[in-house]
Amino acid sequence: MTNDCSKLTAIVLAGGKSSRMGEDKALIPIQGVPLLQRVCGIAQGCADTVYIVTPWPERYQNLLLPNCQFIREVPLSGDTGGPLVGFAQGLAQVKTDWVLLLACDLPKLRVEVLQDWAGKLDSVGDEAIIAYLVHHPKGWEPLCGFYNRRCLPLLLDFITQGGRSFQQWLQQHQVAALPLTEPDMLFNCNTPEDLALS
Ligand SMILES: Nc1nc2c(ncn2[C@@H]2O[C@H](COP(=O)(O)OP(=O)(O)OP(=O)(O)O)[C@@H](O)[C@H]2O)c(=O)[nH]1
């Protein structure tokens, strides 16, 4: 991996229901900037191309920053898909070896930390490693880390067999840990109460 932006694509997932928030999280302004736009702005600091995967691009059209583009998520028949399916649809469009995957609800992301992680991964030689993620007591944090494009066939197999859980999928493969020096960075904004802390 690399800290050269041209070798990394970012995928930002923005297709959740925001049921705990009660309104679309992606549109909520944090310090005057809608959350989705804020996350895309940070992703731009690491990647030349930023894909926003969402079933409803029209909703976010006026938030689009340079070098960002939508991938319209196609619902799977009979199920809502969820973030794993959104990721697979985004990953299918990626041309770079490595992808930075981000949720759209991370108000405390730090571009310096993401760049530092990307730069350290230059030395990855182990082809069995499909992702570099932060590990916490509940498992891997899937929505703020790096995936190798090689994982797409594995992901599609898992989805075809009915899998929808990132945790279950990641348990089946080799993942390496990223150092988390700033735990606050992974703070998810899920509820109106969380907004007060953002
Ligand atoms: N593209 C896409 N993104 C999703 C989907 N489901 C969740 N996400 C994104 O995944 C991230 C984490 O989502 P969650 O907070 O777990 O779920 P949510 O649906 O947004 O919120 P809740 O309804 O409160 O659980 C956010 O960036 C969501 O926009 C999906 O089906 N498709």
Image: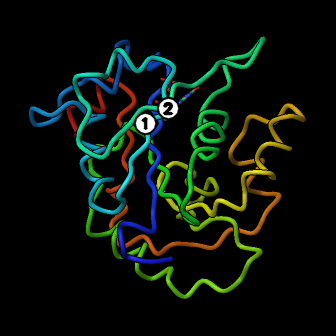
Q: CB atoms at circles 1 and 2 under 8 Å apart? A: yes
Where residue 128 sits, quadrant-wise, is: bottom right
Give the residue displayed 46% in from the left and 75% down from the top: 179
* Mark with earlier residue (1, 2): 1
In the image, taking residue 160 as reference, residue 84 lies left or right, namely: left
The residue wearing badge 2 is: 71
**Residue 106 x, y percent position in the rendering:** 34, 44
Ligand 1 within 8 angstroms of badge 2 C-beta: no
Which quarter of the figure is the C terminus placed in? top left
Q: Locate residue 170 relative to residue 9 in the image: left or right.
A: right
Q: Is residue 17 above or below residue 91?
A: above
Q: Nearer the viewer, residue 83 or 40?
A: 40
- Residue farthest to the right? 161
Could you tell me which residue is drawn at 79 percent across and 63 percent down? 173
- Local packing at callout 1 (Cα closer than 10 Å; few below 14, some 14-19, many 20+) is many
Residue depicted at 37% across the width and 76% down the height? 3
Which of the two discs, 1 and 2, sits closer to the camera?
2
Say left or right for 57 vs 109: right
Q: Nearer the viewer, residue 115 or 25?
A: 115
Q: Amino acid at mark 1?
A: Ile
Indicate whether 131 appears above or below 16. Answer: below
Which disc is residue 98 wearing? none
Measured along the vertical axis of the image, is residue 114 above or below residue 76? below
User: Label 2 crowding class (10 Å Cα cut-off): few <14, some 14-19, many 20+?
Assistant: many
Its colouring scheme is rainbow
Residue 52 — which label?
Answer: 1
Structural distance between the alpha carbons of marks 1 and 2: 6 Å
Which amino acid is tagged 2?
A: Ile
Check disc 2 and report its element: helix, strand or loop: strand
Please state the horizontal and vertical placement of residue 82, each as a whole percent of the image: 63, 28
Residue 27: % across, % down:
27, 23
